[in-house]
Image (cartoon, rainbow, N blue to C red):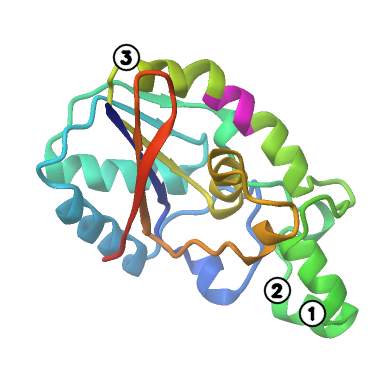
Amino acid sequence: MAYLILIRHGITDWNIEGKWQGLTDTFLSKEGKKQAKEVAEILRGMRIDEVYTSELSRTKQMYQEICNSLSLSCPVFHNPALNERDYGIYTSKNKWEVEKQLGHEKFIQIRRGWDYPIPEGESLVDVYNRVVPFYKERILRDLKERKNVLVISSGNTLRALMKYLENISDEDIARLELGFGEIYIFEIDSKGKILGKRILTH
């Protein structure tokens, strides 16, 4: 058996301001760094064999804070398949102002819809179609070798991956919310089957 540990990065200033970040390379806020240290304490004592993050600084920084606290020395891989969803024309816009302009129904479709098209950006299904193959080809291989794998990414990327892992419906995925620094631990057997799940919060 192995553990798949999924963590959303800590909060950034753009998160606090309600801005859609997408692929904008933002950094953890002071509170985000504190969240990372709290996550590290929760993980203390758990073996971590490999780490995957996106190419965005906020996920790399989250890992670095955890690494420094736990003195980790395992292999670390940064891959664009784990990048946050590209919000296209909505990138850098304040989501609450967009809701006022477009109305609540369209806003929810933009923010949480499964296949709602985003001009110059990605729908959640687009994210799913890049993160799930990466999981199958790279991360699942490690898990089948009984390696404990830590994945640090952004909210939409992890939502897309968890849709696959838990077979969440297109409708129900809109209700899945991941908190900043929230930890999801899946127990995986040698064939890749999920045996159990725990959610840990700091």
Locate residue 26, reporting x and y percent: 52, 53
Span of residues in magenta: 131-135
- Magenta residue check for 117: no
Image quadrant in which the C terminus is located: bottom left
Tell me what residue is drawn at x 54 percent, y 64 percent.
Answer: 177
Q: Is residue 83 above or below residue 144?
A: below
Gap between marks 1 and 2 measured at Cα: 9 Å
- The quadrant holding residue 144 is top left
Do residues under tags 3 and 1 come within 8 Å of each other at their CB atoms? Answer: no
Number of the label disc, if any, that sits on residue 77: none
Q: Quick one: label 2 or label 3, which is nearer the N terminus?
A: 2
Q: CA distance from mark 3 to mark 1?
A: 46 Å
If you read the primary sequence from the N terminus, does the residue marked by circle 1 or circle 2 appear first?
Answer: 2
Image quadrant in which the N terminus is located: top left
Going 73% across and 64% down the picture, which residue do you hit?
A: 111
x and y percent of residue 193 in the render?
44, 29
Callout 1–callout 2 Cβ contact below 8 Å: no
Query: Mark 1 — residue?
Result: 99
In the rendered image, is residue 185 in sight? no
Left or right position of 65 against 144: left
Disc 2: which residue: 94
